[in-house]
Amino acid sequence: MLYIPTMGDALVCYSYKCRSEGTDAANARELEVINLLHNVFGLKDYAGQISPRDAGSFPWQSSLDLNIIQKLPGLRDNDEFVITFALENVLNFIDEDEGIVNYGYYSGRIPVMDLRIVDGKYDYSGYAYRYDAIDNPFNISRSTTQSLWRASLGFQYKF
């Protein structure tokens, strides 16, 4: 859980150990952090307070599978011939941009930034981005094997 600052927040500093507040570098850092937390991570509604657990969410994903089983009579009375067709991830079969399975950190926690508390203030001068926080803020990766479509055709004779 993370304190989400407002612009000019008295509880937050943006220079190393709060030593150079008001400088151009600290002001630029404030804009950078505010943009990251409010706009990129979508935490603007929690400005001026500690964000609650589960304040964010991962993107939705969907998948659709098709399984067809056809039973036909066999050559003898109690025999049967079974034909099966299975198509996993029909959405990806129809459109390669659909049926994509994405995942983030297993725990659901996202490392947003390093911070420390200095003299009762949240020091947000540390390195803010542990990965590409602007283009991929939730560190989402694509599961290549689960995002592909697969088809199988089976034949079985039961006697």
Image (tube, rainbow, N blue to C red):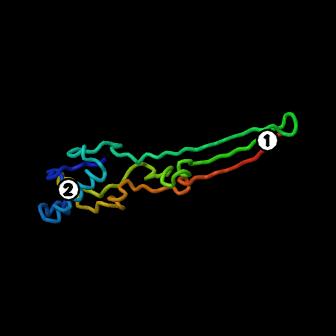
In the image, 157 versus 43, the foreground residue is 157
Specify whether 35 is left or right of 27. right
Seen from the viewer's position, the closer of residues 40 and 92 is 92
In the rendered picture of this protein, how many numbered marks are placed on residues? Answer: 2
Tell me which corner region of the image, top left, top right, bottom left or bottom right, holds residue 112: bottom left
Point out residue 93 in the picture as x, y percentages from the top left corner. Answer: 56, 52
Is 5 displayed left or right of 149 in the figure?
A: left
Report which quarter residue 81 is drawn in. top right
Please identify the residue farthest to the right as the structure is shown.
Answer: 76
Q: Is residue 85 left or right of residue 53?
A: right
| Amino acid type assigned to the residue bearing label 2 in the image | Val
Q: CA distance from mark 2 to mark 1?
A: 75 Å
Q: Residue at x 14, y 65 (%)?
A: 24
Identify the residue position indicated by label 1 in the image: 81
Question: Looking at the figure, which quarter contains the C terminus?
Answer: top right
Residue 118 is marked as 2
Spot occupied by residue 128 in the image (x, y as percentages of width and height): 29, 60
Kindly identify which numbered label has been placed on residue 130. Answer: none
